Amino acid sequence: MSKPRKPIVAANWKMFKTPSETADFFKTFLPVLGNMDGVDVVIAPPFPCLPAASEHAGKSIVRIAAQNMHPESSGAFTGEVSAIMLRELYVTYVIVGHSERRTLFGETDAFINRKVLTAHASNLKPILCIGETLEERDGGLVKEVLSRQLAAGLAGVSADDAIETVLAYEPVWAIGTGRTATSAQAQEAHAFIRSELEKMYDAPTARRMRIQYGGSVKPNNAAELSAQPDVDGFLVGGASLESGSFFEIIRAAVQASVEG
Ligand code: PGA
């Protein structure tokens, strides 16, 4: 039996790689990826690398994501970019609410929600990141934090748009730390998120929504995490910078999806 949802594996390059390094990555990655199917593959490079990424992705299965955007379409917002600018660069997805944006740049749930709504209105698919800090986990607040971030992040989002929204559960304590959630911890959080989505929408909608896991995903832990029934792919930071390790993670997600 195969899994009910197509896995989606996304690379979050953060502030790594120049445009020429982006081109080099695609030149090695695309031949390795070959004509892999049964998975959506997404790469989110830094803004200046988007043209190179779009050009190289061409007709391959790779879709391009931005790592952030502003909710307004234009205006006096020095340093920001808008959805229409991204659309013109053939961007398909946009990461919103990453914990680094929340903690380092002070983004609130309400501001993140505006981005989610703008993304949908602009034909971009948001990858909405949620997840608890270590302090919140130790304080027994995981469910409370996830419910709050989900309710606020998806406020005003219709069921049709919710299906086009990708969620990324990223426990903050696992990001870039080499400390991955155990597969049981990931499954517990993902199942809880799906149950919340069912309450917010309905069972068929919740069943169709994809929930990625993120936080120190590597080739050596991707298979076990992928085997969890509610893990529908990954948002990968460090291990996505190298084409070989990113490919291994994609392969693990495809394998688990076929095996169900
Ligand atoms: P990591 O980052 O894989 O390097 O932990 C994940 C993320 O921040 O999306």
Image: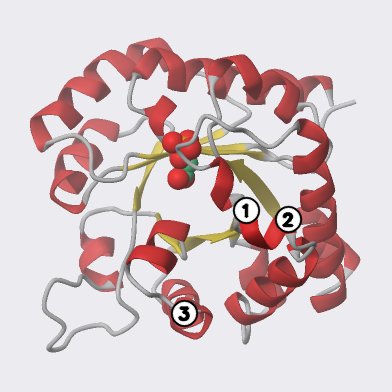
What separation in Å lies between label 2 and label 3 (alpha carbons)? 22 Å
How crowded pointer 3 is (Cα within 10 Å; few <14, some 14-19, many 20+) is rated as some
Instruction: Say which of marks 3 and 1 sits in front.
Output: 1
The residue wearing badge 2 is 138
Give the residue at x 39% y 54%: 92
216 displayed left or right of 61: right
The residue wearing badge 3 is 108
The part of the image, by quadrant, that contains residue 40 is top right
Name which residue type carries label 3: Thr
Pick whichever of labels 2 and 3 is earlier in the sequence: 3
Name which residue type carries label 1: Leu
Q: Is residue 111 above or below residue 219?
A: below
Give the residue at x 11% y 37%: 19
Give the residue at x 50% y 42%: 175
Q: Position of residue 229 (x, y in %)?
A: 84, 37
Q: Position of residue 32 (x, y in %)?
A: 39, 11
Q: Kindly check if marks 2 and 1 are in contact, taking CB atoms under 8 A apart as contact.
A: yes
Instruction: Say which of marks 2 and 3 sits in front.
Output: 2
The part of the image, by quadrant, that contains residue 62 is top left
Q: Is residue 145 above or below residue 245?
A: below
The residue wearing badge 1 is 134
Tell me if I can see residue 132 in this picture.
no
Q: Position of residue 52 (x, y in %)?
A: 15, 38
Beta carbon of the mark 3 residue lies under 8 A of ligand 1: no
